[in-house]
Amino acid sequence: MKKILLTKILTACIILKSLVATGQVQDLKMNAIQLSCKVSPDGQFSYKINYKDKSVLLNSSIGFELSKPKVILDRFDVLKIDSSSYDQIWAPIWGEEDSIRNHYKELVYHLRDKGTSKIEIDIIFRVFEDGIGLRYAFPKQTGLDYFIVQNELTSFHLGKDHTAFWIPGDFDTNEYLYNTTKLSQVDALKAAAKEKDIAVTALVNDHTIQSPLMLKTGDGLYINIHEAALLNYPAMHLGLNKNTFELNTVLVPDAVGNKAYLHTGDVTPWRTILVSDKATDMIASKTILNLNEPSKLSQTDWIKPQKFMGVWWEMHINKADWKLSTGKHGARTENVKRYIDFASQHKFDGVLVEGWNEGWEDWFGNWKEDVFDFVTPYKDYNVKDLSAYAKSKGIKLIMHHETSGAVTNYERWMDSAYRFMIAHDMNTVKTGYVGKIIPRGEHHDGQWMVNHYTRVAKKTSEYKIMVAAHEPVHPTGLHRTFPNWLANEAARGAEFNNAPTLGIPPEHNTILPFTRLMGGPMDYTPGLFHFNLNQFDTSRNQKVLSTLTKQLALYLIMYSPLQMAADLPENYEAHMDAFQFIKNVPVNWSTTKVIEAEPGEFVTIARKKKDRQDWYLGAITDEKSRQLVLNLNFLEKGATYVAKIYRDGPSAAFDKNQTDYIIEEKTVNANTVLNIPIARGGGVAIEFLYKSK
Amino acid sequence: MKKILLTKILTACIILKSLVATGQVQDLKMNAIQLSCKVSPDGQFSYKINYKDKSVLLNSSIGFELSKPKVILDRFDVLKIDSSSYDQIWAPIWGEEDSIRNHYKELVYHLRDKGTSKIEIDIIFRVFEDGIGLRYAFPKQTGLDYFIVQNELTSFHLGKDHTAFWIPGDFDTNEYLYNTTKLSQVDALKAAAKEKDIAVTALVNDHTIQSPLMLKTGDGLYINIHEAALLNYPAMHLGLNKNTFELNTVLVPDAVGNKAYLHTGDVTPWRTILVSDKATDMIASKTILNLNEPSKLSQTDWIKPQKFMGVWWEMHINKADWKLSTGKHGARTENVKRYIDFASQHKFDGVLVEGWNEGWEDWFGNWKEDVFDFVTPYKDYNVKDLSAYAKSKGIKLIMHHETSGAVTNYERWMDSAYRFMIAHDMNTVKTGYVGKIIPRGEHHDGQWMVNHYTRVAKKTSEYKIMVAAHEPVHPTGLHRTFPNWLANEAARGAEFNNAPTLGIPPEHNTILPFTRLMGGPMDYTPGLFHFNLNQFDTSRNQKVLSTLTKQLALYLIMYSPLQMAADLPENYEAHMDAFQFIKNVPVNWSTTKVIEAEPGEFVTIARKKKDRQDWYLGAITDEKSRQLVLNLNFLEKGATYVAKIYRDGPSAAFDKNQTDYIIEEKTVNANTVLNIPIARGGGVAIEFLYKSK
């Protein structure tokens, strides 16, 4: 990760008294964002946030309840206040932008428990142009060394009944459909009760929901609450008080009910509050990424964004199976070769193979520890032959490590498993955590598992292996720190098109960019071209609730450096003209423009191909049709482009005639305004091929 | 492990009806032992045991409470009863005997839940000449696959207020001092409250105690209750009903309160009830060992009983420290060389080094996960130099892997750690589990940890490494199955001589052979020659509560194929005449005779050196002095031996003049009767060197 230092100004305007007077308000402004901090005479610290003249957060609390030592830290003496500012531009090694500005003002309160513990704790605020980050630091100090967090007392006092885009709080899954309701109408348990297709759940209560939480206020603000740099700490969920519209931090417990085991010198993740009067600013924000540490990898040339196909969807739609014993095993050598051939012919980078290893006959649902060994292929999967064959075709096999939640087992095997990958010329692994976690009592989103995901990211990097985790904790921008950690699932992705109960209604994709994707790339696996999922199993009623061109648009909307063409070769062969877009669409970008967006309604994003002049654009809508009026002013002034437009045909909709699409070419420039109809639940995808200046 | 088959008779007298009639009593006798099984008309199964005409167990129950599926299995239909008998002699690759007879009659009840579950369960009884084993098997069956054990309903209905030799039930430690009381006087919490020096405890309640439990009845029987072949199951503790004197099985829970995750096809450990009217039969019993499976190792020539010294006790007595930062690091290269020199000069096999690796500065007490990496020596420990130096001196360095209870971390490092050992010419590892277990919520004695200890035994065997575990679950004879698993601590061993509160009173060593050692060899680490433990720290009041010759006798009493000479070279140099016994005493035997024994009072054991005619004998007493009248009829008839007797001097006692000892030689034969005084808390050790026939 190249680091381009522009300016770094440490103003360090320290307020010098042995104890800072209480009652005094400390303000910090960055453009429209204003943070105000206050300590009441009895030592209660509060912060509030305004955006221009509008309230984002009313006075909100901070603090901790520790279980060891047993103490509540919610009344403080202020020892010192430090402030500084920072402005830097840095270049991610892959991503949505060539360079990212990290510009903030920082305020650090050095606090000391007013009670008998005298524990010292710092609260650090960073104010950006589009929001605020706050974290705690526990300085080295006499009398405190290791300690255990029982509760974090950070609150987010919204104070009004905003519209919220939310999923139920759950310590083990984030694969719910989003709900759009007023905060007062949140009922997490009722919402979860509609869901029948999630393997493992651990719901919290009726009023706890997950972050990233997207909110829209009555007075036109968009607010996003999440966290950044979730390391060595449990995930934050949000407990809603429906009387006060205050959100409290709900940390995921471990097996014995503790939340986090910390040490002085440790810091917590950042709590992030993003705010703007433009919805597009939410999606475009780089604040969460900026709050993560830069990569410590000295060499990164082995890390490559990639497009892949996989022996995967055919198992979901019952053409094949993960299990050998069913007699229709997907990961057969000759079947994998068919994928390699197709992927190679169409210039993909990789082919994922699931169900390649022994253990699938009895892998799920019994909290069983020793399921897979990650190095023993099924007898009909000739890994040596296939790795040679893939290599001869310019394809990398992508490894699949399904842990079934038995993480202790995976950790015992990790080194051997990665050595096996290297020996067979693989350098990308898809991990999976479908099942109740072992260590038993731990949750997918607790501190132990957070540390596991990080451990995988670190260990794979030692082997120069890239990783995409399925069923992990919500991402928090850690791909900056671990650039080999390309993507995560961590939300309801394309595989739920196959779920019997609810599928993926069109609205879901218009909310994901405002929620799940705030934390980083999603391995959503778009590109389904066959919509009735009874293709190989006539008993199935599931449908992909999308038009074909929306599937194309998702390659722009669901940003990831690791993009799958999820469908079967034969399904692509039925629409090779449309497949051309998937072949062409890049997975790495120099610039991104969020053209328009409204959570739950529509999203339009344009991206400029890395090191090229070509642009790509995707637009999607919810279950309503939409007339897209597209001002191409993002294109280079004075240049001419051929726009190849993949759009819904007149009869198309997400629930019928999904493959009615039109591909047309137009010559355009930065002054062009395109008018494109989008079908109900449809989308449009456009390539802008640079012709001349 | 060579297997010499003598006879194997399968009588298979099957009672053939579709359902066996209830109310019928099934008896099985082997010499003095009589097992009677009965199913009441309502399906309740009970078993009872008599010894000659005396009751050992009144009607006692069997069964299970499962938590998944939720069902209580305590009323049964009998589908079938199988019986058979077995008689075999087998040869352990090391041990107390050249060959062991495994002779039993077996009775298998094939039962089916009388309730709606219709779950089938087998109960298997084996009746030996000195006791009974019973276990459950869950046959493959329709309608049951994986299941979770909530409680095992096996009881041991003693029915009378016997004298018991017991330690408090505790899920995390077995390092308590033994208590000798009537069952009615058991108070586990009160007993535990006296203990101040145990690092991690998880007491159960006032009436739960541990197995092995030694009992003595008013009518002259000795009864021992324990378990054999503890694999993939939690340890059994014993809940005492002080009204009925019935003991119930208390299984160690996991982090979420479940006890065992099982699968049809699995079996439970054996519950063992040993009984005799001679106390010596308890110690001599091979029934627990016989109930374990033979080793599956194809090659065992790398497994060697051994005697070792160690950089260890000097840390306990504050001459040195495990930590580098204290400025008196024990594991310094030159200090280790001093041990190697001494050990080599006196023909030891190995030198253990504790505190050799980074992590000790901050290793204990904080439930910290990433403590040690097991491959990074302290900078003053030159492992390369030392492994070469040791090799040149004919010494093997013994590795120390203290996990601090962070077992997930150890499991991640195991392969690397064992490769590190092999690279540095080490093939024995002492593991340690001092601390609260991670996975958090698991206990030292739960199913997960039981599986861990087994995993270590298996994985070390793959690397041809021998292992001795400290702070593990109580042993259950698994050294038959894993012959590289030489020994365990799993009780209060010699290091507790240094504990400030209670130390090791003389009685303790007379109880251990009846309790802890029933399950297998103990790495007790005897051989302390300096009794006031203020040698290097004048603030210390601790004393080794033993005479010097008792320390010698312990090499016979505390059987192990891995014996330490625990004291410092300089302390041995002060008594080189007595040290000669430690140099000479073997660690592998062809025959063992328990001459006399009474739990809590005295133990005398003679053993014949492997492949030699020489015998060795040790005798110890409790806090009372004793006149040992020793009939040497175990010696070869007609042969002459020189007996070198290491005995307490006239002023010696465990609490004063501990080093007053006498070494004398006598010519003896099988007709000789020796009269030897043993001091209060003292002992005697004798070599019988074969001279001629």
Image (spheres, coloured by chain):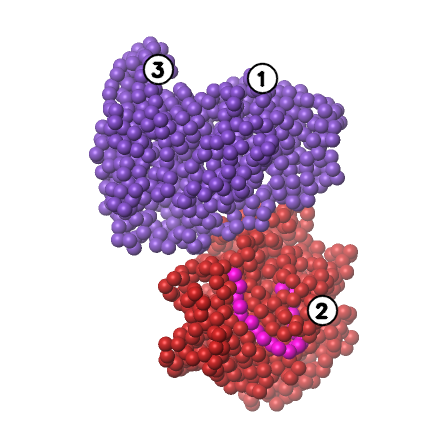
Chain colours: A red, B purple
Q: Quadrant of residue A179?
A: bottom right
Q: Secondary structure at mark 3?
A: loop
Q: How many labels, in total?
A: 3
Which residue in the protein does label 2 denote? Answer: A505
User: Both on one chain, marks 2 and 1?
Assistant: no
Q: Which span is picked out in magenta? A: A148-169
Q: Secondary structure at mark 1?
A: loop
**What residue lies at 43% left-to-right and 39% top-to-bottom?**
B175
State yes or no: residue A155 in magenta. yes
Three-letter code, disc 2:
Pro
How far apart, in angstroms, are the residues tagged by discs 2 and 1?
Answer: 78 Å
User: Both on one chain, marks 3 and 1?
Assistant: yes
Three-letter code, disc 1:
Asp
Q: Is residue B637 visible?
A: yes
Q: Residue B634: horizontal and vertical position, in percent?
A: 38, 15
Q: Residue A196: horizontal and vertical position, in percent?
A: 71, 59
| Image height of A75 relative to A627, above or below | above
Which residue in the protein does label 1 denote? Answer: B53
Which residue in the protein does label 3 denote? Answer: B632
Q: Secondary structure at mark 2?
A: loop
Left or right for B145, reference B333: right
